[in-house]
Image (cartoon, helix red, strand yellow):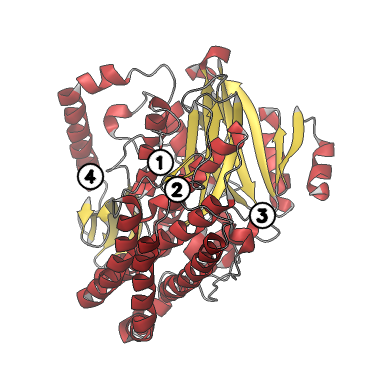
Amino acid sequence: MQTLKALFDNYNTLSIDQYKPLWLRVKINPDDLVTISKALQSHGLRSLVAVSPTDFIDENRIEMNYFFEDLTNKINCWIKCDIPREIESCEVDSLTPYFSGANWHEREAFSMFGVRFRGHPDLRPIIVSQDFYGKTPYRKDFDWDAHEKDTLTNIQTIVDAFNQEQDIGEDHLDANSSEMILNWGPTHPASGPIRLKVHCDGEEIIGIDPDIGFVWRALEHLVTQKDFIGAIVAVERLCFMDNINSMVGYAQAVEEIAGVEITPFAKWMRVLLGEVTRISSHLMGLGGFYNAMGLHTAFMWSLDIREFFLDFLESYSGARIATAAIEPGGVRYGLTPNMFDELQKAIEKFDNTKSEIRAIFVKNPTMKLRASKKGIISQKEIHDYALCGVVARSSGVATDVRIDEPYAAYDQIKMKYVLQKNGASSDRLTTLFEEVEQSVDIIKQSKKHIEENIASGVFNPTKDHMVKMPKKLPKGEAISRVEWSRGEVLMHLVTQEKATSPYRLKMKAPSFNHTMMLNHLLKGETLSDIPLIFGSLYICQGDLDR
């Protein structure tokens, strides 16, 4: 960290502090953004994982926040700079020419806040539908009520834009060739609500332009309309398959600003619950991968095992999916002995069938013949595109927030990185299965620790689940990282003085960057490879669109 600090001796920084043991926070002049970012890149911080604007309307400025990570040395940097708020002058240099992963994040900032990025190669709106183009919905003065009253006009705008796009696309094709543009989606059995605009020559793919946002719910705006507890309803809908870990990330940011430390019991419960939903998500990922290849029986097998873990979530929270089980201050519910009975059934179900699952999933000849040669992602691409989670570890990149920057009780858990070497679609499937095994082991460790401490009287399972949270928070800012089922989720929370609700919450989620890779991975492949490669990227539309 001292070496990273020394790097800024060469620049006229406005402020600098070591925000956390692994994070340096620096405020700079926007004119120095490119120079400093390239210097960070040369220093090993090759991944730009998120770009987060904040609209300080009363101060007439947009604050830009950039989060750089060194996935190898685990040293990270949070860069801040102010730019004018007026639309005509609200611009800053693009980092896309230097960091591939910046591409869509800058497009999102352009769509939601109206920030223009000088030098961006393709600054089109993203996520939002055409009725929001040019309207900057995340600015504080955007009138949501007025927009939503024009429902019929908005729908017609979307329809007209789609028809115009189709006409323009056809006009640019060579009538004497076999080129065509296919719409893969917007609802496809292998992917759900996403449209891939596939430019192909016969069966060969020339290029792919993903059209996302079909389930956009403006979650980052919705949380600002709730109090700090009520915001959980929006946060957990980042993706229903792993709602626990996203809530943990948000709760940690709130607790940091509030200056509140949760109980050891709540920390261990966050680990246990988080690993249960990780298993739930991974089993859906495994099944979905095979479903995309037409192996529907394997899909049903994985769902069968998943049901046992959902039984435990239901016994704990009363809900199988949208549990709302985490909130600032700890975990929402206490623990009764029969709840662990349901969890034990799930553990035994997996242990008794995992050898069969491995034989079916990991040794499947269809996977070996096709998936081992398709969708290969190099370690360099992992860093350049800021990829994470299963996708990164399958290419041999040792990154996992639970190990790199432990939270909850992960600092007391025995675990290792689950790694593969080749970065192919089959490696990602293998990683998913091995991480289910790992999560079961973590659950066993957590369950044993909780049971022993209840028996000794150290934990009171009916009272230790929550500590009191203040109703109003001070002015502050925090980032929180968790290892979600699909990879790192970063929450950037901003509060104002005596706040009763978030002023700004940026939710950086993995599927955004992973979907960005589709054109790179599918160019030159055939149409039949789309479901295979898409399925292996373990994408969820919830966190893709947010």
On the rendered structure, is 226 left or right of 95? left
Give the labeled residue for mark 2. Answer: 246
- Relative to 15, does residue 61 appear above or below in the rendering? above
Q: What separation in Å lies between label 4 and label 2 (alpha carbons)?
A: 44 Å
- Labels 4 and 2: the sequence-earlier one: 4
Q: Residue 83: x percent and y percent? A: 60, 23
- Labels 3 and 1: the sequence-earlier one: 3
- Relative to 396, does residue 149 appear above or below in the rendering? above
Q: In which quarter of the image is residue 398?
A: bottom right
Judge the density around disc 4: few (<14), some (14-19), many (≥20) Cα neighbours within 10 Å: few
Give the labeled residue for mark 4. Answer: 171
Q: Residue at x 37, y 36 (%)?
A: 219
On the rendered structure, is 335 left or right of 389? left
Q: What element carries label 4?
A: helix
Assess whether mark 2 and mark 3 are in contact (beta carbons under 8 angstroms). Answer: no
- Labels 3 and 2: the sequence-earlier one: 3
Does residue 494 appear anywhere in the picture?
Answer: yes
Q: What element carries label 3?
A: loop
Give the labeled residue for mark 3. Answer: 70
- Labels 4 and 1: the sequence-earlier one: 4
Assess whether mark 2 and mark 4 are in contact (beta carbons under 8 angstroms). Answer: no
On the rendered structure, is 185 left or right of 63? left
Assess whether mark 1 and mark 2 are in contact (beta carbons under 8 angstroms). Answer: yes
Q: Residue at x 59, y 70 (%)?
A: 415
Q: What separation in Å lies between label 2 and label 1 (alpha carbons)?
A: 7 Å
Give the labeled residue for mark 1. Answer: 235
